[in-house]
């Protein structure tokens, strides 16, 4: 059964100080390796997100410029287009 923090309930004697917590060095190394892989994936996703954000900003600016050019060709002012 889970405790209030989602931790598994442990009998008092199993969690006593100085006893083996059930995890060996191999388990900690495996967890550490998995966390490193997750961190690498998150870094990669962050880089892709930054790249997409920059490209979208460029597209937005390009669309603004195109809209202004069309408005000028039609003889409208930018404030008239918002009505």
Image: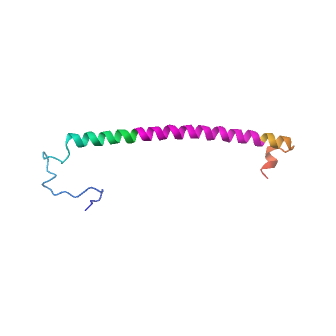
Q: Residue at x 58, y 40 (%)?
A: 53
**Left or right: 17 with respect to 64?**
left
Front residue (pair 36, 14) = 36
**Left or right: 30 with respect to 61?**
left
Percent position of residue 38, x then y: 38, 42
**Left or right: 50 with respect to 78?**
left
Q: Residue at x 24, y 43 (%)?
A: 27
Dividing the picture into quadrants, the one containing residue 28 is top left
Q: Quadrant of the N terminus?
A: bottom left
The number of numbered badges drawn on the structure is: 0
Its colouring scheme is rainbow
**Left or right: 9 with respect to 70?**
left
Q: Residue at x 86, y 44 (%)?
A: 74
- The segment highlighted magenta reads 40-67
Front residue (pair 38, 70) = 38
Q: Is residue 44 magenta?
A: yes
In the displayed image of the protein, which residue is found farthest to the right?
A: 75
Front residue (pair 79, 1) = 1
Dividing the picture into quadrants, the one containing residue 4 is bottom left
Instruction: Name the chief secondary structure element in magenta.
Output: helix
Q: Residue at x 81, y 42 (%)?
A: 70
Position of 36 relative to 16 (above/below): above
Q: Is residue 19 magenta?
A: no
In the displayed image of the protein, which residue is found farthest to the bottom?
A: 1
Percent position of residue 58, x then y: 65, 37
Percent position of residue 36, x then y: 35, 38
Percent position of residue 6, x then y: 30, 57
């Amino acid at each position: 059964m889970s405790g209030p923090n989602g931790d598994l309930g442990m009998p008092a004697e199993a969690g006593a100080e100085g006893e083996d917590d059930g995890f060996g060095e191999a388990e900690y190394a495996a967890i550490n390796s998995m966390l490193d892989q997750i961190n690498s994936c998150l870094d990669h996703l962050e880089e892709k997100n930054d790249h997409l954000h920059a490209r979208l900003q460029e597209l937005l600016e390009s669309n603004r410029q195109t809209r202004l050019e069309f408005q000028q060709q039609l003889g409208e002012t930018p404030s008239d287009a918002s009505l």
